[in-house]
Structure formats: structure tokens, C-alpha cells
Amino acid sequence: MTPTTQQTRPVCLSDLTQDRLAEYIASLGQPAFRAKQIYKWLHQKLVTDFSAMTDQPKALIEQLQQTCTIASPSIRRKQCSQDGTVKYLLQLADGNCIETVLMRYHYGNSVCVSTQVGCAMGCRFCASTQAGRVRDLTAGEIASEIYTVQRDTGERVSHIVLMGIGEPLHNFNNVMDFLEIISSPGGLNIGMRNISLSTCGLVPKIDELAKRKLQLTLSISLHAPNNKMRSSMMPVNDAYPLEQLIPACRRYQQATGRRISFEYSMVRGVNDSPETARELARLIRGMGAHVNLIPINPVDGSPYSATDDKNIRRFRDLLEQLGVNATVRRRLGADISAACGQLRREDARQSSAMERNDPT
Ligand code: SAH
């Protein structure tokens, strides 16, 4: 990480945790307090330009401008829903686009962040994965999603959900660095209890996460109570079937003392029958876990359609009768391209149509 004059790739300072930034700034021959100040500029005052770091010596600012960068995506598109939800299509420095969503709740503002460009998991109902995974986001890029929303709205973000494009546990190290940065007192200081991480169920990574004993909420995208049904919706179930996933969830709860929640997107005629509710109750009863029910958001090219509200409520009532906590999740931003990955795909389609129509 020692900078040299031949260095071709600039160091993105936003990616560095506080300790690593301290090492880097020390390697430039600067005193330790400079690293602390710079960390605050990046992660608390949210500047996107070194020249805004007004307490830094001019020579250091010039050196940083030549050898380092700050992650600062541009807002390519923005859709505002009547319920206050705002969906952003953000363009990264290399031209790739990701989605970030601001949701306004009575308890505060929550931002749903992407963790990868695209996704490799292949869930059949999900728009994010249709063109595969392009690359992982860096820790600084993930944090910059939140910073961009805060700068754009002028409002504080108090909660984060890792439920946007990508599989967070498939980008484990960068996501762990992001969590350290975003929860650090020198940064936005967002408490782990205000952070939820959602996974399709990468069992070895769930165990690795459990070892860190973070106080975040782990959500498992379950969507089905048996392997046949789950594999038909989620290919990851072939690698980590329910007889591995559910014990991993139990181990996670034991190790962290935190209850997990299960996401359950309801698809008409596939996973929404009373028999399926009973099977689900048998699978997870006694875990103290919570089930979030949500109607599937049908995406182009997917054979699935949503269960209607009445049947979702019936499914919830049955779960409750069988001793499983369940809520029907309010759908925010239903009037904008709400399901994750839809806006990015729409934009990619429009751009390629524009290129095709471009006479030059
Ligand atoms: N990869 C992670 C997080 C991203 S997806 C995961 O799988 O959990 C966030 C949640 O939205 C997951 O529960 C996912 O299964 C669900 N989801 C994706 N596409 C959806 C759609 N079209 N309708 C309803 N839920 C969807």
C-alpha cells in the first residue's frame, strides 16, 4: 500500500477502515491525528473532494489528489414515490450502475443498499440476477450509497438494510469493512441494531458471520419450506439445502443471541397454500424467528405472479395460530420500479436501445 510515483491505480481512501487509513496516512509520513481528521471528512462530513478538507496542509491535499480517490457515485436517475420512497440509480466511477432506495418510516430513514453489480445467485423471481454478476462493490462504494442519499435529501439516515442488488455474503470481506466503517464513531455511527443483512443462504458464510457476533439482524430469504419448492425458485438451495440452512440459522442465533428473520415472498400457486404454511410452521417453529411475508413483485420474463392480499393474510393467520410470528410487510414504493434490480435493467435496456437507434 506504500505509494510510489509509478503507482498506476489510485488508492480509494473511502474503502479503508479507520485502522487501515491510519496505516496508510502514516506511510505518507503524516502524524496520526491527520488520519482521524481525514476519516471524519470522508465518513462524517461526507466530502467528495480532497480540496474540501480545509484543515489539511496544502501539500498533503495535493498529494492525495494525485494518488487517491474518494468513492462518489453520480445520480443517473431518481424516482420518487408518493409514499416518500426514493429510488436512485447510481453510476459508479467505472460506469456500472447500481440501485439504492430510501424508505421513510416513522422511526427514521432507512436506506436499502446494493452490495454487488448484478448477482450470481440466480433466484428465478429476481431482476438483479438476470444478467449475472459483474463485480463486487468495495466497502467505500457501499457506504457512498448512503452518503449520496444523505447529501441529496439533507436528511439523516438512521437504518440500513443490505437488501439491494447482490448477495452480501458473496462479497463478505468488503461488506464486513463497510459495516465497520458505517458503524464507527468517527463515521456515521449507525448502530448494528439498526442494520439488517439479508442472504439467500450461503451456509459457510452464515457461520463465518456468526463468529463475528455482530448485533445486526440477519434475514434469510427462505421463500419455501421444502427443498423441491425452494430449489425450483432458488438454485442456491441445491448447494445449501434446508437441512443445512436451518441448523446454520440455529447456530447463528446461539452464537449471537440475536433472533433471525425469514423473508417469504409469496407466489400465487407456488408457495402460498395452507399446507405450505403448515409445513413452514413445522420447519421453523420454536426458533423464535420472525417471518416477513411480502407479495412477489413480478419481473419481466418471470413466470411468477403475486398472491393476493386476502390469501397472504390467511397464510399469516395460519402461521400465527401454529405459533410462528409473522407480519405482512408494507410494500413501499409500489408505484415506482420497486423490486430490486428493475431500474438498473430498465436503464440498461434503454441505453442499448438508444445505442441501436444512434445513427452515428
Ligand atoms: N441477496 C440477498 C439480498 C438481496 S434481495 C438475498 O437473497 O436475501 C432482497 C430480498 O428481496 C430477498 O429476500 C429476495 O429474495 C427478495 N426479492 C428479490 N426479488 C424479488 C421480487 N421480485 N419480489 C419479491 N421479493 C424479491
Image: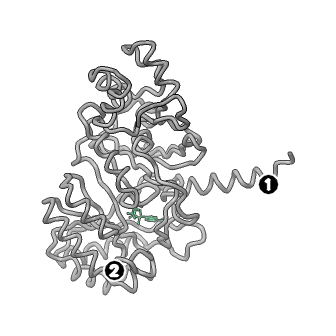
**Residue 269: image x %, image y %?**
44, 82
**Residue 168: image x %, image y %?**
38, 57
Q: Ligand 1 appears in which quadrant?
A: bottom left
Amino acid type, mark 1: Arg
Is 4 on the left or on the right of 350, as rendered?
Answer: left
Name which residue lies at 35% across and 63% down.
Answer: 199
Query: In which quadrant is the N terminus drawn?
Result: top left
From what the image shows, is residue 196 above or below residue 230? above
Name which residue lies at 25% across and 37% down.
Answer: 184
| Residue hosting label 2 | 241
Name which residue lies at 34% across and 77% down.
Answer: 240
The quarter holding residue 281 reads bottom left
Is 319 on the left or on the right of 29, as rendered?
Answer: left
Residue 281, numbered circle = none
Figure colour scheme: one colour
From what the image shows, is residue 293 above or below residue 113? below
Label 2 beta carbon within 8 A of ligand 1:
no
In depth, the one of 344 and 310 nearer the eye is: 344
Disc 1 versus disc 2: distance between alpha carbons? 43 Å
